[in-house]
Amino acid sequence: MQTMILEKICSLKETKTPLRLMEMTPPLPMGDDLLIKISACGVCHTELDEIEGRTPPPILPMIPGHQVVGQVYGLGPEAHSYKLGDRVGVAWIFSACGACRYCQEGYENLCEDFQATGRDAHGGYAEFMTVSDRFVYRIPNSFTNTEAAPLLCAGAIGYRSLHLTGLVNGQRLGLTGFGASAHLVMKLAAHLYPDTDIYVFARSENEQVFARELGAVWAGDTQDTAPVKLDAIIDTTPAWKPVVEALYNLCAGGRLVINAIRKERSDQDTLLKMDYPSHLWLEKEIKSVANVTRQDVKAFLTLAADIHIRPEVQEFALPDANQALVELKEGKIRGAKVVVM
């Protein structure tokens, strides 16, 4: 099978081809595994974090990719939940222990033994992969393969982020960064909170225009001040400066939800510019988002189908995955990028 494989940690500023196209033997499904013939795999900023070493794979080489859509092509001897030909998806959560306190309480995203697709186990930048049938999702018929792929991470983590804001209909929502996840959050929030005005902070003028096209009442740079204070802001950027600016834009009692697995260190000194009265006082809150649960993915897929959410998608052939990653690194974003087989 063809794969795009990560063999070493590197900087995308210095290396424009971090992944290498190579042939591998397709894996065999064991136990309750499914062998999936992959049709599409979304491209996520977390892949940049893996490649550049902020959340590196424990073992190299590794096949990245964790927004996977395909068909069941083979069954392990203990796999009984799906049949050959079923269309399924695989998300960031590859496995969790199922026995710890967090798993038992519905917070498997916090499990100490959490395993991530494409980081701790081979992922979807390939023609085939295997995964336990307990960590696979049926894809609603209303979505094409390329539409479904971004929903499995960008959509699901956006759904979890929006839930964690504690937003009430009519309160003001801010989105800092406007890539794959944020543009899906905007569509979701417009349905769940129809009286909520949405304000977008984005570096790129193209992203600001895109946000207005999707219904933002205001869009400006990440360092701009919104015309009003906001009740909640979701940050999806890799940087620290937008975090500081977002805190300034919150109203009293507002909450900032940081939807990023890691932050880059290039502007970390920006944190020293925080002013307690302006940025944190008056019971402002900061909350991070850690991974997703299977329930997040299932709930979002169902909701997205019910309310007809469709991501904006740019397609890339598997051998062009490096181009998609470099464009993501350079901020050339409109919606979601998807690798197709």
Image (spheres, rainbow, N blue to C red):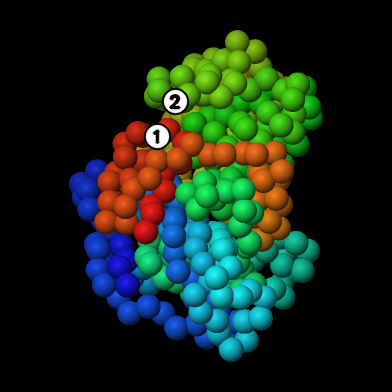
Viewer-side residue, 241 vs 62: 62
Give neighbour class at mark 1: few <14, some 14-19, many 20+ (Cα, 10 Å). some
Q: Is residue 188 above or below residue 132?
A: above
The circle on residue 127 is none
Query: Circle 2 sits in a helix, a strand or a loop, which is it?
Result: helix
Q: Is residue 307 above or below residue 227?
A: below
**Kind of residue sitting beneath label 2:** Glu
Residue 290: x and y in percent read: 60, 52
> In the rendered image, which quarter is residue 62 located in?
bottom left
* Residue that badge 1 annotates: 333
**Mark 2–mark 1 contact, CB under 8 Å?**
yes
Q: Is residue 297 above or below residue 170?
A: below
Residue 264 in view of the camera: no
Residue 256: x and y in percent read: 63, 34
Q: CA distance from mark 2 to mark 1?
A: 7 Å
Left or right, 295 with respect to 272, comes to right
Q: Residue at x 57, y 63 (%)?
A: 88
Residue 238 in view of the camera: yes
Residue 9: x and y in percent read: 29, 59
Q: Residue at x 54, y 33 (%)?
A: 183
* Residue that badge 2 annotates: 207
The image quadrant where one finds the N terminus is bottom left
**Kind of residue sitting beneath label 1:** Ile
Query: Circle 1 sits in a helix, a strand or a loop, which is it?
Result: loop
